[in-house]
Amino acid sequence: MREGKSGAENRAPDRPWIFRTYAGHSTAAKSNELYRKNLAKGQTGLSIAFDLPTQTGYDSDHELAKGEVGKVGVPVSHLGDMRALLDGIPLDQMNTSMTINATAAWLLSLYVAFADEQGASRDKLTGTIQNDIIKEYLSRGTYVFPPEPSLRLIKDTIVFSYREVPKWNPTNVCSYHLQEAGATPVQELAYALATAIAVLDTVKASGEVPLDQFSTVVGRVSFFVNAGLRFITEICKMRAFNELWDEITRDRYGVTNPKDRLFRYGVQVNSLGLTEPQPENNVYRILIEMLAVTLSKRARARAVQLPAWNEALGLPRPWDQQWSLRMQQIVAYETDLLEYGDIFDGSTEIARKVEELKEQAKAELSTIEAMGGAVAAIDYMKRRLVESNTARLSAIESGEQIVVGVNKWTETEPSPLTAGEGAIMVVDPAVEAEQVERLKAWRAARDAKAVKAAIADLEAAAKEGRNIMEPSIAAARAGVTTGEWGATLRRVFGEYRAPTGVAQSAVARDSVALENVRGSVDELSAKLGRRLKFLVGKPGLDGHSNGAEQIAVRARDVGMEVVYEGIRLTPAQIVRAAVDESAHVIGLSILSGSHVPLVQEVMERMRKEGLSDVPVVVGGIIPPEDERTLKAFGVAAVYTPKNFQLNDIMSDIVRLVGSQAMAA
């Protein structure tokens, strides 16, 4: 006990939240090594990042997986990979979060199958699968199936978990990526709660959970939220989430047990606000954002994972992740935060803002409800997010919203933290070939008849409406791969392309800068004999479409003809579209770290099609050395997060096309 304590301060401090680091890269074995090191450093839970092929149901040797293997997470193609990933980690003693959505049922099946092998009792497994497909349609883009079968898969995991793994959170409604896509606090509240309602309504309508036990299902719904830099607003948003969820679960679902009405959430603080210029400032941003979800006891996160200070530059190193972990530990163990009740109770300012957010969120929920719920309102919500993000970027461009080091106080000393080789982690290109070889060896060693039988039963379960989980666990044991599981369900459910929100979004407000670019577009279009046509493409599996959407919207607003068909295109499809559309310029957006191989293939295909005179520009999180590589391929310009003035990018594109036209 600290000297001077008295009264309420004499009680034992609250237990801290779970400390996590979102991690996974290269291979299952390398990721396992990283997890063990992080746990030894005081991390108290795992947060697994999967690579994009795993998230979208492809094996590492699929055409669309090229360049993506092991880049933004760990490849898990089969039970052998799951064994290597979690080797030596007792699953009945670990709280594991898996950021996985379209393929959540499959990854949970692999996890349970490995737990069974370990002898870990299913009723002792604790953790979370994200399993929120609606926000994938709206923001992050790792969806596979249409909405109805996707909700059915979520329902299956919930029903299975309620029966077999009762301490597991089988759906984790994720508003994090909504904020990354531009959501205001009101939109984040409303769209996340609308998604939770859609999921619970689906489970209830199935009749697969007795009504007298439905409260238990409600109590296992968790949330994953975002905390931005508007510190007071974010605290109030979290308190509003708590109160709104309590009201919804009580009034809509008749939950009487207060414990089952708790708003249980984990958080990663905002990565969208991390800056490439003066990245050392990001340390302060991360700390302030973390305080927004830990200071208010009634709205305190159950688990926190923090980005690294240099994520706007590239993949963080283990040391960078350790720095973020230490930030959590210092707040939890060196301050007196956990020794007090809620320090905001009784604040009139906090109460006023919470009520304001609640009323506005309720109004937005009513709008969504009137449309028929979250699934029916996907187009509407996507359009609103694109508009909100446009407004946010416009405010930064104009200087109305200050971002230190980006649009104000840009003078800086060179940072020793970003100097020299090894300033960011780079995944060895050889990783992909090695993973593909291991995958081939796995296929060759398994019992082909058992695999065929497991796939047949999985397909039958999908067609017949049986719960998908036990057939998926059986398939995992038989050696079925992630790609085979995905292909089987694609045959039954089909695939889906989400709305882009670009064509329907409001036109940007006029400004002198916008008018100047419009004038130059009109002038060049007259010289070309037709409207300047800009093809915006997202090659590979990267679904983070915010940048591409904003470029497409601004190009439209300055008078260009824009071709943007959304995410997940092969280089061949993009080049084919460039030929068919007679594009004057191509813009490629890639944030997954796979820019070098994907851009190289696009450039090679363009040369074969005789399109060497069409300039290509690339945007993404691209280190300087990679920028030089891309330009050596023939790329005309590279834009990174420091290039926040979209009108300047548009002017640059006009100049590039004009120069090419003059040379022709």
Image: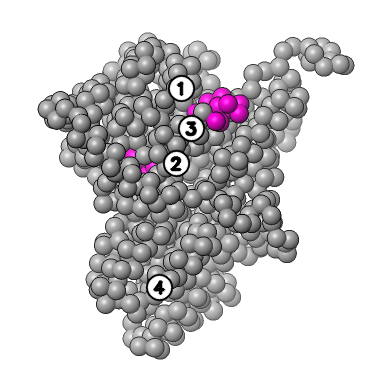
Where residue 356 appears, x then y in whole percent? 62, 38
Residue that label 2 marks: 25
Residue identified by numbered label 4: 634
Q: Secondary structure at mark 1?
A: loop
Residue 151 visible in image: no
How far is disc 4 from disc 2 in space, using C-alphas?
29 Å
Q: Is residue 201 above or below residue 548?
A: above
Q: Position of residue 61 (x, y in %)?
A: 27, 46
- Amino acid type of disc 1? Ile
Do the numbered discs 1 and 4 sit on residues whose CB atoms are within 8 Å? no
Residue 595 visible in the picture: yes
Label placed on residue 89:
1
> Which part of the image, by quadrant, shows the N terminus?
top right
Residue 78 is left or right of residue 128, and the answer is left
Label 4 neighbour load within 10 Å: few <14, some 14-19, many 20+:
some
Write the residue at 70% across / 60% down. Answer: 414
Give whichever of 605, 639 is nearer the camera: 605
- The residue lying toward the viewer, choosing from 426 and 551, is 426
Q: Disc 2 or disc 3, which is closer to the eye?
A: 3
Identify which amino acid the numbered label 2 is placed on: His
Q: Which amino acid lies under the numbered mark 4 shown in the image of this protein? A: Gly
Contact, CB < 8 Å: mark 4 with mark 2? no
> Where is residue 477, by image quadrant?
top left
Mark 3 vs mark 4: give the one in front: 3
- Circle 3 residues within 10 Å: few <14, some 14–19, many ≥20: some
**Colouring method of the image:** one colour
**Circle 3 sits on which residue?**
33
- Label 4: state its secondary structure: loop
Of the pair 48 and 205, the residue shown nearer to us: 48
In the figure, is residue 33 to the left or right of 65?
right
Rounded to the nearest angstrom, the CA distance separating label 1 from label 4 is 47 Å
Q: Earlier in the sequence, mark 1 or mark 3?
A: 3
